[in-house]
Amino acid sequence: MLRTMARMQEAHNLQVHPDWRTKRYEYYRAIWIECAELLDHFGWKWWKRQDPDLAQVKLELVDIWHFGLSELLRADAVEPELAVTLDVQPSEHPGPESVRQAVEALASACLASKGFSVERFAGVMRVLPMSFDELFRLYVGKNVLNGFRQDHGYKDGTYRKAWAGREDNEHLMELLDGVDEPATAAEDLYAKLEARYRETAAS
């Protein structure tokens, strides 16, 4: 699964820019911004009721993994041991504040090093909880969506992120429900995204 994700990330990064390894992209900055977005979906405001949207929380964590994996690939640091680190055992009754603190620890570590901390990332997986299998499944789905976005004008601003009043991430989660083997379903998932994108064009 780790090798598959590494191959998919390499392909996507080449789609964004053929010389992505030498462009000095600030992946650490993207990571801490995504951490903030994750907390918005999870809830952090003490002055109002907020119910965690765990599906979107997990997708934000997958977005973080895209950037973290890119940093690891650029540093030639994708090793088999990473899979062991990410194959976490869930924490028992961690509580919502444990999730917030784990996310902040990840953001802090990435800001301090201007890199990526696999251990802190695994810490967030542990308290959500999120298994390595689930990370893989959602990664494949989001990677396909990211490629779809690039193919449909994400860079030049012509892509519609909202389809029929809902974000494309929400449509992706619905379509993923029908996918049993994510490693072999990328092409089929892309076709389903294409069909729904066109169907909702008039909405």
Image (spheres, rainbow, N blue to C red):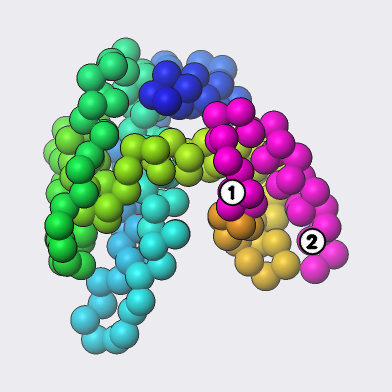
Residue 200 on the magenta span: yes
Asked if residue 107 lies left or right of residue 138, the reply is left
**Discs 1/2, front:** 1
Give the quarter of the image for residue 141: top right
Q: Nearer the viewer, residue 98 or 129?
A: 129
The N terminus, quarter of image: top left
Q: How many marks?
A: 2
Magenta-span inclusion, residue 188: yes
Q: Which residue is mark 2?
A: 200
Query: Which residue is situated farthest in the front direction here?
Result: 180
Residue 157, compared with residue 137, is above or below; it is below
Can you tell which mark lies on residue 176?
1
Instruction: Please tell me whether residue 28 is drawn above or below residue 129 in the rendered image.
Output: above
Q: Label 1 is placed on what type of residue? A: Leu
Q: Residue at x 21, y 49 (%)?
A: 90
Q: Quadrant of residue 89?
A: top left
How many residues crowd mark 2 within 10 Å: few (<14), some (14–19), many (20+)?
few
Q: State the image coordinates of residue 28 (x, y, percent, origin top left).
A: 29, 37
Q: Please say if the residues under marks 1 and 2 sit with CB atoms less than 8 Å apart.
A: no
For the point 58% across and 60% down, the residue is 170
Most common SS among magenta residues: helix
The answer to which of 17 and 7 lies nearer the viewer is: 7
Q: Is residue 28 visible?
A: yes
Residue 59 place in picture, x, y as percent? 44, 51
Camera-nearest residue between 71 and 42: 42
- What range of the chain is rendered magenta? 175-203
